[in-house]
Image: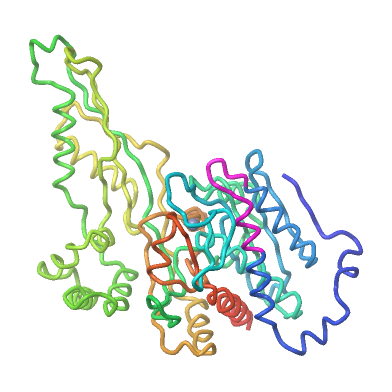
Amino acid sequence: MKTFGLKKGMLLASVPFFLSLDAAAGPNFDQASKNARAILGSLVAADTTNPPGNEARAVEVGVKRLKELSIPFEVTDFAPKRQNLVARLQGSQQKKPVLILAHLDVVGTTGQKWHSDPHQMIESDGFLKGRGVFDDLGMAAVGIEVLALLKEQNVPLKRDLILAWTGDEESGGAGIQYLLQNHRKSIEAEFALNEGGGLHLKNSSDKLDRVTLQNSEKTYNDFEVVARGIPGHSSVPLKKNAIYRLSEALARLNQYQFPLVMSPTLRRYLKLSADLEDKEMAAAMKAAAKAPGNPPPDVLKVLESKPYTAALLRTTCVATLISGGTRENVLPSEARANINCRILPEQSVQEVQQILRKVLTGGKEGSGVEVSAAAPLQSSPASPLEGPLVPAVEKVLKEMGAGAVPIVPTMSLGATDGRYMRLAGIPTYGLNPIATSKDDHETVHGPDERIPIASVRRGVEFLYRLILELNR
Ligand SMILES: [Zn+2]
């Protein structure tokens, strides 16, 4: 671990004389968004493709900026050349801190057809393009410039505002796990704002049509199934064959459906995003949201006709890898499969394991099939929808003239650093301040990743106002 702090005399030396005049003039969002774009360009150029990550290169960009701003920070090494950066703007501590979380690593571009160098940010057709501009370097850049603006404006805060730039989100979350295990105090907060949800634009327009607030994620867990049989010469087949046992077990899993869970998040999601779907789906979503218990079968059938909607309703477990046998002419003694489960926050991982065991063994002792967790089991609870965040977001949207935009709680099917945060007891909400459309979303992890240029300025203003609102 390396620690950098405020050096003596640094504060005095770097505070410009005109600060008070500037404060009277109010925050300069245009300048702040220019700064955010410059930081974003440098973060893209740092090329933090994971693996290997090299997040230290991106941390350097943040360190330089924080030193200019005289904002204290801490750099932690979680692996060679891999670092997290945590900065803190001190408040009066009448209320608990708020944390802005963003990850620095990006996914690779191998085999993708980009129209420009992915690690040189460009402006074209009203977009900023480059690997990571959306996921998640944009939020990192906006976050640091909001800290800068609050500092410049000398805004009195009731809460400390923490900014954490983490590494390794894209492959396991080693960065956030390191912070939670070794520097928990530095990121302790009433709640955190993270990627995974946020301001959403109607396609090819600058109109907000909703704000998604990701308050839960399905939990990722792998299980291994091993079927055993009696080995021998394949010229004399035996009933107890490992490959047949495994295939029968997997066929049972394919037929099985985990129980339907109508959680509060799901109900609100179905109700508030119904109007964005086609007529039949919209009607089904509204009916399901209103149904006192589980939706009627005809409604369920429509919901389940779309794989994405279907995956929101239940825990899912699916076979993803298979291996078995040793030779063409030898009866296999063993066959294995990996079962990848995505578990609803309302269901315990232990319960899923029990169900899985029952389904795969057919409920029979001596089935020759064993099920075990591939890694220590973990689950991640949903973050509460009550509290100061939702009213604050509503108020800021109104102030910014966005009109009545629904705030839709969502559960992600994938996973972000948020799962470790929630597991550690820090409520976490996906709320990216940079407004993007469905088309922009489709560039994430793909070629020509992009965000609308205009969304940077709006994002800085939104997050700045939101922080002010949370400090009233
Ligand atoms: Zn991400």
Residue at (47%, 57%) from the top-left corner?
A: 115
Above or below, comparing residue 402 to residue 420 in the picture:
below
Q: Is residue 193 left or right of residue 67?
A: left
Residue 61 part of the magenta segment: no
Q: Quadrant of residue 261?
A: bottom left
Where does the magenta region start and end?
39-54
238 or 320: nearer the viewer? 320
Q: Position of residue 365 (x, y in %)?
A: 16, 30
Q: Where is the N terminus found, in terms of image quarters?
A: top right
Above or below, comparing residue 329 to residue 66 in the picture:
above
Q: Position of residue 25 (x, y in %)?
A: 75, 89
Q: Where is the C terminus found, in terms of image quarters?
A: bottom right
420 or 430: nearer the viewer? 430
Above or below, comparing residue 451 to residue 332 in the picture:
below
Q: Position of residue 448 (x, y in %)?
A: 46, 59
Q: Is residue 184 left or right of residue 200?
A: right
Residue at (43%, 83%) from the top-left corner?
A: 207
Q: Quadrant of residue 95?
A: bottom right
Residue 41 part of the magenta segment: yes
